[in-house]
Amino acid sequence: MHENTPRLTVTNEGDVIVAELVDKKILDEVAITQIHEQLAALLGPVAAPKLVMDFARVAHMSSSALGMLITLHKRIREKQGELRLCGISPSIYEVFVITRLNEIFQISKTRPEALASL
Amino acid sequence: MPDKYVTVSTIASDLRQARQLEDSLIHEVGRFGYSEAAVFAIKLALEEAINNAIRHGNRCDPDKRVTVRVELDTAEMSISVTDEGPGFNPGTVPDPTADENLEKPSGRGIMLMRAYMDDVHYNQRGNEICMCKRNA
């Protein structure tokens, strides 16, 4: 049962929110919706949010998860905020390349690199 | 190691049942010694195909079912996923990598299946996808 399980580990680094995805697989609609809702609640009160999403634990993700990231990215940009992705495995990075989403998102190899870029 | 694994599974239009079936099939793939890259590809394609069947084919109708047929040996895995919807024409799906579609939140599943599997085709009605992955 996943309905009430937090999907993110959230920390603050100065004015940057760091959200690490907890699950190894980001696949189904329920989990993806929960992640989106948790992020929306985190970012809602922040005027120009700076968010780092850490994928270090993620081994698989679906196209629906990519869609969620695109929607999230749009909302952050609408608020003049910034989004960085980091810790993405080579297999998943290839998915970003195939879909050309590596051209949309700013992707850093590590969390420190992502933080340093903000 | 077994010589061949053949199975036909029918599930409701339910994502939880879908995940259970996917996990079970991926476990079988592991027993046949497929590479890590091949397992990643198969998992991704299974996920996208069954999701599409449930969401777009059956429109999440709990009375409609999804049938997954698998033939697996050490050389290749064949998968077909059939829904009970009216079907669609995959040729009409916009290219998600076109500049104008890059920031659309959906429409990447078919492209990813084609990218990761060695062969992907649909039946004429468009309610069944057949895919093959060789164990390179």
Image (spheres, rainbow, N blue to C red):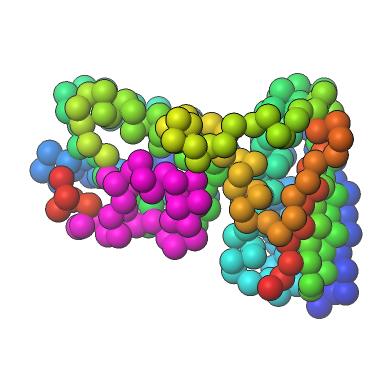
Task: Where is residue A9? Give x, y as percent.
Answer: 33, 45
Query: Dividing the picture into quarters, in which one does residue B125 lie?
Result: top right
Q: Residue at x 68, y 56 (%)?
A: B117
Residue A93 is inside the magenta segment: yes
Viewer can see residue B43? yes
* Residue, far bottom: B1
Q: Residue at x 55, y 44 (%)?
A: A62
Above or below, A51 against A57 in this view is above
Residue B123 is inside the magenta segment: no
Say which quadrant the C terminus of chain A sits in.
top left
**Closer-to-camera residue (B131/A48):** B131
A81 on left or right of B56: left
B2 on left or right of A35: right
Q: Residue at x 79, y 73 (%)?
A: B74
Task: Where is residue B14? Give x, y as percent.
Answer: 71, 32
Numbered-mark total: 0
* Span colored in magenta: A84-113
**Closer-to-camera residue (B55/A104):** A104
**Closer-to-camera residue (B134/A114):** B134
Q: Residue at x 45, y 30 (%)?
A: B100
B38 on left or right of A74: right
Query: Dividing the picture into quarters, in which one does residue B42 lie?
Result: bottom right
Task: Where is residue B67? Give x, y as percent.
Answer: 84, 40
Above or below, B119 against B15 in this view is below
Say which quadrant the N terminus of chain A sits in.
top right
